[in-house]
Image (tube, grey):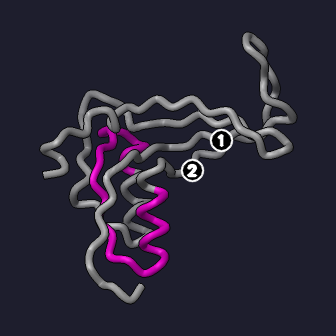
């Protein structure tokens, strides 16, 4: 990136729990899936990592829970050169989580539990 100004991303930070299935279940139906993958993600975190990989000086603003996922999410951001000093660990609430089923055609079905993401407030951004 030619411009070396800092990039600030304000957004969600989630642990994505991904299971591949032959087909997505209908309402009330259960299907057998493959192995479970826990992948750091979230729309905001994914944007921050992408910008950092393109050479940006990226700072993430958001919240994670004071839990095992929160620690893993912070480490994944830092490992991708995203500054995390403005990500707060929030006690008493879990980190955000997305449960994602992906079928053999690449179609998906997603349920998001926002967790600590829902606690981001104007003061966090200030």
Does residue 100 appear to the left or right of 121 in the view shown?
A: right
- Given residues 99 and 69, the one toward you in this image is 99
| Residue located at (41% from left, 32% from top) | 114
Asked if 90 appears above or below 113 in the picture, the reply is: below
Q: Position of residue 58 (x, y in %)?
A: 33, 69
Asked if 52 appears above or below 18 in the picture, the reply is: below
| Residue located at (19% from left, 50% from top) | 125
Q: Quadrant of residue 115?
A: top left
Q: Secondary structure at mark 2?
A: strand
Marks 2 and 1 sit apart, C-alpha to C-alpha, by 8 Å
Q: Position of residue 69 (x, y in %)?
A: 43, 43
Direction front: furthest residue: 3
Q: Earlier in the sequence, mark 2 or mark 1?
A: 1
Q: Secondary structure at mark 1?
A: strand
| Residue located at (32% from left, 33% from top) | 118
| Residue located at (49% from left, 67% from top) | 50
| Residues marked 2 and 1 touching at CB (< 8 Å) | yes
Magenta extent: 46-71
Which mark is on residue 39?
Answer: 2
The residue that mark 1 highlights is 18
Which mark is on residue 94?
Answer: none
Work out which quarter of the rendered image holds the N terminus and state it: bottom left
Direction top: furthest residue: 28
Q: Residues within 10 Å of mark 2 (few under 14, many from 20)?
A: some
């Amino acid at each position: 990136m030619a411009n070396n100004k800092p990039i600030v991303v304000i957004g969600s930070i989630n642990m994505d729990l991904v299971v591949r299935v032959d087909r997505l279940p209908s309402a009330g139906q259960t299907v057998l899936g493959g192995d479970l993958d826990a992948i750091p993600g979230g729309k905001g975190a994914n944007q921050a990592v992408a910008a950092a990989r393109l050479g940006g000086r990226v700072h993430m603003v958001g919240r994670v829970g004071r839990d095992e996922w929160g620690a893993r999410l912070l480490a994944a951001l830092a490992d991708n050169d995203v500054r995390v000093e403005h990500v707060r660990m929030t006690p008493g609430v879990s980190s955000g989580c997305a449960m994602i089923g992906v079928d053999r055609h690449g179609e998906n079905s997603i349920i998001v539990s926002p967790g600590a993401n829902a606690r981001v407030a104007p003061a966090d951004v200030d």
